[in-house]
Image: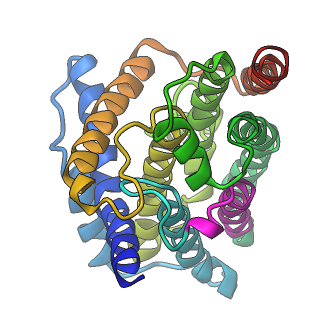
Amino acid sequence: MSTGILLQLAQTLLAILLAPLLLGWVNQCRAWLQGRSAPPITQPYRTFRKLFHKDAVIAHNASPLFRFAPYMIFACMVLAAGIVPTLVNDLPFSPAADVIALVGIFALARVFLALAAMDIGTSFGTLGARREMLVSFLAEPALLMVFFTASLISQSTELSVIVETLGHREFAIYPSLAFAAVAFWMISIAENARIPVDNPTTHLELTMIHEAMILEYSARHLALIEWAVALKLFTYSVLGIALFLPWGIAAQGDVAALPLALLAMLTKLLLGGAVLAFFETISAKVRLFRVPEFLGTAFLLAVLGMLIHFLLEA
């Protein structure tokens, strides 16, 4: 049990430390593909250090919720990153790693961010909160459909059982997972405010969603939110690996496989970050009114994956 707890803490700390590095890698690949001078891969760490050393500027009419929300959002993302199998499967947090509860953790963080955005009463914050709720209203059902497809194959909603079924048993091809993987990619794009749903580098009123909600934050509060954004991208990345590319994740008690598991995870994250940067380079930001069509397609693909499971695999 003590070894499991240590591995659980190590996995969670690894996620916290590697999340900004993954974000820096995506930004670097995107700059290279666009022919620009790339920032150093450690730029997010430098930005966080600068923000933590500044004094926070808070509006006079801000409620305690506005100050508490960044800590709650960061804690939710740390919890989500801790319960997803990253290096080792079936850790002490595994009983809490139910996919439905995981969706609830993401939703809880989103609710606090939206409430904090509306707390000050600015038009930008309210605009961003409404748009964020629109995206979540369409993305969460599609994400649940993706999880249900994987849970039907493994006969469980626990991520540890899903990884055990798909990665540590006999090799099998599941056509339903192909549709679920495409749907999950589209959902992760929307949930992480990436192109074509949102542009994380813009501050234009007509296009921004996430950035509109955090314009009133500064210093340590802004650093925590941005770190939580990096953690969310990392969590979705390792979640996609656990669902669709679980090979390389060490089994329970197999401590000797940890170096290989770490190497496999880093390789998958590097390739995934490069692919994300590539698609962002060749894609354009869609109009806000086309986002429901984008996420509706993701929901349709996820439902098709479930139907294919019942027709061909059940």
Determine which quarter of the picture holds residue 53: bottom left
Is 295 on the left-hand or right-hand side of 182?
right
The relative height of residue 158 versus residue 65 in the rendered view (above or below) is above
How many numbered badges does the structure rendering display? 0
Of all residues shown, which one is farthest toward the bottom?
A: 64
Secondary structure that dominates the magenta span: helix
Residue shown at the point (70%, 35%) measured from the top left: 153
The residue sitting at 49% across, 15% down in the picture is 283
Is 304 displayed left or right of 256 in the figure? right
For the C terminus, give its image quadrant.
top right
In the image, is residue 179 above or below residue 128? above
Q: Position of residue 219 (x, y in %)?
A: 39, 73
Q: Is residue 110 magenta?
A: yes
Name the residue at 23% across, 34% down.
Answer: 28
Which residue is depicted at the point 42% across and 82% down? 1
Q: Nearer the viewer, residue 169 or 238?
A: 169
Q: Which residues are magenta?
A: 94-116
- 281 vs 146, nearest the viewer: 146
Q: Position of residue 166 (x, y in %)?
A: 54, 36
Q: Is residue 210 magenta?
A: no
Question: 166 left or right of 261?
Answer: right
- Furthest toward the front, the residue is 170
Residue 251 occupies quadrant? bottom left
Q: Does any portion of residue 27 appear in the rendered image?
A: no
Q: Viewer-proximal residue, 294 or 38?
A: 294
Residue 4 point in image, percent of width and height: 40, 75
Is residue 135 in sight in this rendering?
A: yes
Q: Is residue 253 above or below residue 190?
A: below
Q: Position of residue 208 (x, y in %)?
A: 60, 39
Quadrant housing residue 54: bottom left
